[in-house]
Amino acid sequence: MAFSHTLEDVGGVDLVFYVIGGDIGKRSAGLVRAGGMLVTIAGPPEAQPAEGLAVDFVVEADRAQLGEVVQRFRDGRLRTNIGQIANLDNAVAAFNPTERIKGRTIIRFRP
């Protein structure tokens, strides 16, 4: 399946979380709007947002901690606030809604 959109079609965003670095990481930095944040677990970012922050961190998986996260979710103590879910083909429209949507926007990469 071929997509007709490029990464830059998404426009300015509040948060970019990337895990692969390289060219995608450099291009992603340009998507962060003023006051936004670029977060990476792929090492120090190769590019900085023009008017935002860049943060890198290392995560070491711990079975007990991951188990606690799962238990909190099951107990209803960890909740998500999802406003809409859109396919990648509709990402541009999803991030430029005609009406205010409460909650986070999730972009699904697979149908």
Image: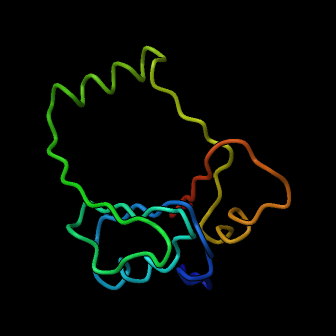
Quarter in which the N terminus is drawn = bottom right
Q: Residue at x 28, y 73 (%)?
A: 45
**Quarter occupied by the C terminus:** bottom right
- Relative depth, front residue between 88 and 104: 104
Q: Residue furthest top?
A: 75
Please provide percent x and percent y for residue 90.
69, 68
Please give left or right for residue 80 compared with residue 19 in the image. right
Q: Position of residue 8 (x, y in %)?
A: 56, 82
Q: Residue at 62% of width from left, 85% of height from top?
A: 4
In the image, 78: left or right of 95? Answer: left
Residue 29 position (above or below residue 95): below
Residue 53 spot, x, y in % from top left: 41, 65
Please state if 12 lies on the left or on the right of 16 as rendered: right
Where is residue 25, by image quadrant?
A: bottom left
Instruction: Determine the residue positioned at 42% across, 23% down.
Output: 73
- Total of numbered circles in the picture? 0
Residue 6 image point, x, y percent: 56, 84
Most extreme residue toward the right is: 98
- The answer, for residue 67, to whether it is visible in the render is yes
Relative to residue 7, is residue 92 drawn left or right?
right
Q: Nearer the viewer, residue 34 or 73?
A: 34
Residue located 26% across and 61% down the image: 56
Residue 2 seen from this side: no
Rendered image coloring scheme: rainbow
